[in-house]
Each structure stands twice: as structure tokens, then as C-alpha cells.
Image: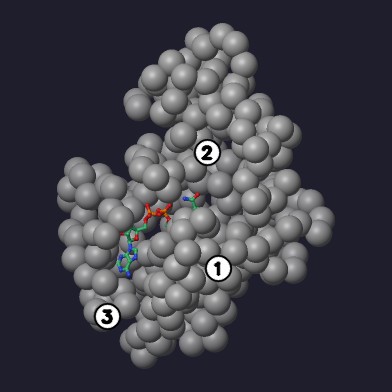
Amino acid sequence: MRVVVTGGAGFVGSHVAAYLAERGFKVVAVDNLERASAVRRLEEVGVSLVVGDVRFVDLPPAEAVVHAAAYINVEESWERPYEYMWNNAAATARIAKQCAKTSTRLIYISSAAVYGEPQHLPINENHPTRPLSPYGLSKLAGEQVAQMLAPGAAVLRLFNVYGPGQTGPYAGVVSKFIERAKGSLPPVIYGDGTQTRDFVHVADVARFVEVVLDRGAAGVFNVGTGRSVSIRELATIVMRLAGLGGEPLYAPPRPGDIKHSVADVTKAKLLGWQPQIPLEEGLRELWTTW
Ligand SMILES: NC(=O)c1ccc[n+]([C@@H]2O[C@H](COP(=O)([O-])OP(=O)(O)OC[C@H]3O[C@@H](n4cnc5c(N)ncnc54)[C@H](O)[C@@H]3O)[C@@H](O)[C@H]2O)c1
């Protein structure tokens, strides 16, 4: 099966592209390289890269498109809401329309940010969607336009993804903690650290994309682990791996940060998928290969 992965030179997209290629899919990555971090990963597995901007170019022909290209920074989205809506939502309309016209399956990579403040935990796919940032709103609009214009689209709401190659100013908390620990510095925790998240390894995300492709699954799926981990716990694990004594540093909470987030992944599991990488193992691997 020929699969196009947009944002294929980014963190999530490159892992998905490389994994699918290793599994025998014919993969083409499309990325405008504006925020690419992983061109090398594609080269290593021989995935071809088309340099193009999904706002402007038509995608190469394929049986399926995994649309992961997006701007992903919540703070930046408050500064540049128009660009976020354009790149994450309007560009998705373009892709969805092209998919519908060419009978191409669309897998839209979305985010748990669409849920906003949890009304109940764990968060299942029927939880209300009230995003708290222009980023979350742009991802929700992307989901809706994908489903409206490309019926049968699959929407994957990723929780906190971590894994090799997540670097740079927009990296998640896992990479930030490890990066500091590599410099023998304690993690910086915003707030009191009792806030919880659901950390899913990027390899488990890639495996789920394959399951969705194999099963021809449509509709919305949470992609997490169902395990709730506090930021303090995460800091403790990273400090233990690094052999760091002492305590983490604490900074004021970040405005707009939700207190708790954990996925109900029952629906994804019904497709036969299971997250396979426990957090401690994923972190150990990340620490040793950093
Ligand atoms: N990383 C996470 O924890 C996480 C969590 C939830 C959802 N997601 C979603 O996963 C997807 C990928 O995120 P990521 O963490 O890999 O981000 P990333 O910034 O590493 O990758 C995004 C890639 O998309 C490319 N891109 C952006 N706009 C483009 C455009 N107009 N045309 C072509 N390429 C473009 C960038 O150059 C970059 O390579 C996003 O849709 C994001 O919303 C990520």
C-alpha cells in the first residue's frame, strides 16, 4: 500500500513514515522543512521526501494519507492564531478534499488538546471538546473538516507523545527533563508537579497507525496508554536514570495548563492494538541513546 505522510520530516511523522516503510508500505513523506527535525531518520530507512507545503501543493498519489503536518506550540498559537488556523485547519480542508476526490483514505493526526479541561477521567472519545488554546481549536477544526470532506476519515487524538528525536523549542516535557539531566541539571517543574499526563511512546503511535490502515478503521480514536503519571513522578524517574540527587526545581504554573489528563484507550484496543512500551522502559532507552 502506498502511503503519504505529511509532516513526515517531523517528530511523529518521521517515526510513522519509517515504521510503515519497515513494515513494507511504500511511503512518501511530504514536508516543507519549516520545522523538520528528522530528515535523517527518513534517509536511514530509504523513505523518499517531497519538499512541499500542504497549504499549496497537491499530494502525490497514494491509497492513504497520514496527515501529521501542523504547527504544534500552544504558546505560539496565542501569538499567531491566524497562521495556526490556516496551517492546521484550512490546509486540512485542502487535503481532505483531495483525498475525497481521489478516493484516498485519510488519517488525521489530532491531539488531546481538543478536549480542554477534563469533565471526567479517563477521557474517552465522547468527552466534550472545548479546546483552551488556538492550537487546540485549530486541531479540532482540522478534525471536523477532515470528517466532513473525507467521509471515512480516521482521527487519532494523540496524548503526550515522547520518544527519540523530539527536540527543539517545542519539545515536550519528557525531552526537556532528559536534556537538562544530561547536563546534570534537575528538571524544572511548572506548578507543584501533581498535574498528571498520559505519556505514549511514539513507536506505539506508529504501530497504531498501521493498525488503522490494516483495519480500514474510521472515526475518532484516543492514542495514549491509559496510565496517569504525575510530572513529579516523571521527574523522579528521569533523576533516577541520571543518578541525580537533590530535588527538582519548581517554577510558577503555566497559564492554561490543565491539571489532569489520561486517555481511555478502550476503543483503540478494540482494534487489536496495545501500547507496548512502558514509560520506564521508554525513558531508559531515551536516556541511553540521547
Ligand atoms: N508531539 C506530541 O506530543 C503531539 C501530541 C498530540 C498531537 N500531536 C500532533 O502530531 C503531529 C506532529 O507533531 P510533531 O510533534 O511531530 O511536530 P513537529 O513539529 O516535529 O512535526 C511537524 C512537521 O510538519 C511540518 N510542517 C508544518 N507545517 C507544514 C506545512 N504547511 N506543509 C508541510 N509540512 C509542514 C514541519 O516542518 C514538521 O516537520 C501534529 O499534527 C500534532 O498536532 C503531537
Instruction: Return the residue found at the far bottom.
Output: 101
Label 1 sits on residue:
134
Mark 3, Cα crowd under 10 Å, few <14 / some 14-19 / many 20+, is few
The N terminus, quarter of image = bottom left
Amino acid type of the residue tagged 2 in the rendering: Val
Q: Earlier in the sequence, mark 1 or mark 2?
A: 1
Q: Earlier in the sequence, mark 3 or mark 1?
A: 3
Camera-side residue: 245 or 82?
82
Distance (Cα) linking label 3 and label 1: 22 Å
At x 55%, y 77%, the residue is: 141
Position of residue 262 measured from the top left corner of the image (x, y, whole percent) = 69, 47
Tell me the mark number nearer the camera, choosing from 1 and 2.
1
Residue 29 in view of the camera: no
At x 56%, y 47%, the residue is: 160
Whether the residues at callouts 1 and 2 have beta carbons within 8 Å, the answer is no
Amino acid type of the residue tagged 3 in the rendering: Phe
Residue 51 in view of the camera: yes
Camera-side residue: 239 or 253?
253
Q: Secondary structure at mark 1?
A: helix
Mark 2, Cα crowd under 10 Å, few <14 / some 14-19 / many 20+, is some
Left or right: 50 in relation to 215? left
Label 3 sits on residue:
56
Camera-side residue: 93 or 106?
93
Query: Residue 173, which numbered label?
Result: 2
